[in-house]
Amino acid sequence: MSRIISAAAGAMLVLSLGSIDAKAAYNAAAGKAIYDGSCVACHAAGIMGAPKVGLKTAWTSRIPQGMEAMVQKSIKGYQGTKGMMPAKGGNMKLTDAEVGNAVAYMVEQSR
Ligand code: HEC
């Protein structure tokens, strides 16, 4: 029995390692709640220069830089040409992974 379980665990490990790429590292579905809680205030309507979620043209120049770059800027905050993105959207309680999931959700809604 324990052999079967460890074989299954091994197979799962291989599967999950095999699927680590830029997209799979983030969970867009889990990011929705983060987005609704901490990002929606600026990103739903495109307040203060924030790229509006769901508006493709607001994201076409941003998505090509890659998830990693967008996530790092969202975690640390940055001053862009359109406005100021506060670190973690101003909610410092968020983990880096939660911010990454929120970015994945926003990008998924906007491509
Ligand atoms: C106070 C308003 C505000 C909040 C809240 C906010 N953002 Fe932003 N965000 C901005 C602005 C403004 C920009 C555009 C800055 C620029 O490029 O000029 C931006 C840009 C971005 C970008 C594009 C970055 C890039 O590289 O082009 C991402 C991704 C992003 N925000 C994610 C988030 C996430 C995730 C949250 C919630 C955790 C969040 N934002 C909350 C204002 C906000």
Image (cartoon, rainbow, N blue to C red):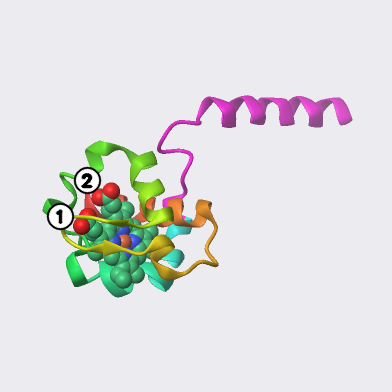
Q: Quadrant of ligand 1?
A: bottom left
In magenta segment, residue 26: yes
| Mark 1 surroundings within 10 Å by alpha-carbon count, few (fewer than 14), some (14 through 19), many (20 or more) | some
Residue 71 on image: x %, y %: 39, 48
To which residue does mark 1 refer? 58
To which residue does mark 2 refer? 62
Is residue 12 shown left or right of residue 100? right
Q: Residue furthest front?
A: 79
Residue at 31 percent of width and 37 percent of height: 66
Q: Secondary structure at mark 1?
A: helix
Numbered range of the magenta stretch: 1-29
- Cα–Cα span, label 1 and label 2: 8 Å
Dominant secondary-structure state across the stretch colored magenta: helix
Is residue 89 shown left or right of residue 17? left
| Closest to the observer, 31 or 78 | 78
| Closest to the observer, 86 or 27 | 86
Whether residue 68 is visible here, answered yes or no, is: yes
| Relative height, residue 21 to residue 100 (above, below) | above
Q: Is the CB atom of the residue marked by disc 2 within 8 angstroms of ligand 1's nearest atom? A: yes
Q: Are marks 1 and 2 in contact (CB under 8 Å)?
A: yes
| Mark 2 surroundings within 10 Å by alpha-carbon count, few (fewer than 14), some (14 through 19), many (20 or more) | some
Q: How many dots with numbers?
A: 2
Specify the quadrant that holds the N terminus. top right
Q: Secondary structure at mark 2?
A: loop
Is residue 59 shown left or right of residue 16? left
Whether residue 106 is visible here, answered yes or no, is: no
In magenta segment, residue 6: yes
Image quadrant assignment for residue 36 = bottom left
